[in-house]
Amino acid sequence: MVSRLERMSLAIGITLLASLPIWAQSLSNFGTIVLTPGFQRSAGRAPGYTSGFFSLATLAAQDQAKNPCLGFSGDPQVPDHIIEVQQPFTNLTIRVKSENNRGATVLVRGPGLLLCGDNVGSDKGATVTASNVQPGTYQVWVGSINPGERIDYTLTVQE
């Protein structure tokens, strides 16, 4: 026979387990950036580093504009950054500026959006620009063009 305390413990355990997928989806390596129109520049910046052997091409071979998704990152299940968009934006530019503009790449995935960029042949950093950005959660993976190479970077989001 199951006691009332055991039933309550079981109910609490089931509730906690049911909430794990939601909790896991909100995890990222370097935190969450929350954006509302008119956000201050400092609110759209986050430091990070990349060093991994997971090919970003396994998340997406190419983005919606047919750009290849290049680079290597740490974990396909855990993005480096999460961007929470609170209200629609006409345009958002996401830039990854690495030390000495070394081979950084970026993949952004969210509601109706899949963009990839790199700084191969450019000194401006890996950059993607999205139009008509809707509210929601956007996952960002930053990679290096060479597997296992550590690259320190700053992620910047601008209107």
Image (cartoon, helix red, strand yellow):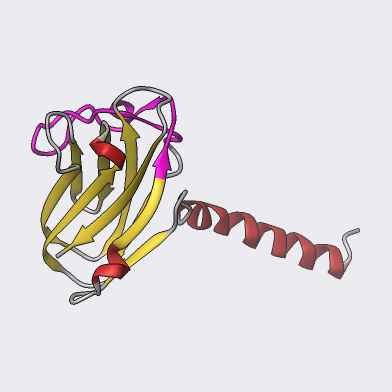
Res. 85 in view:
no
As drawn, is 46 to the left or to the right of 77?
left
Classify the position of the C terminus by image quarter.
Answer: bottom left
Farthest bottom residue? Answer: 38
Which residue is rendered at x = 18% and y = 38% of the image? 117
145 sits to left or right of 74: left
- Name the foreground residue: 51 vs 27: 51
Percent x, y of residue 13? 71, 59
Which quarter of the picture shows residue 137?
Answer: bottom left
Point out the stretch of residues depicted in magenta.
49-76
Instruction: Identify which residue, 12 or 67, lies in the foreground.
Output: 67
In the displayed structure image, the side of residue 101 where residue 2 appears, left or right: right
Instruction: State the predominant SS element of the stretch in magenta.
Output: loop
Whole-percent x, y for residue 5 in the image? 85, 68
Residue 78 at x, y percent in the picture: 45, 43
Residue 106 figure quarter: top left
Q: Is residue 42 magenta?
A: no
In the image, what residue occupies the spot 25% across and 56% down? 156
Visible residue check, residue 32: yes
Which residue is at the front of the view, 133 or 101? 101
What x and y, as percent, mark residue 72? 35, 28
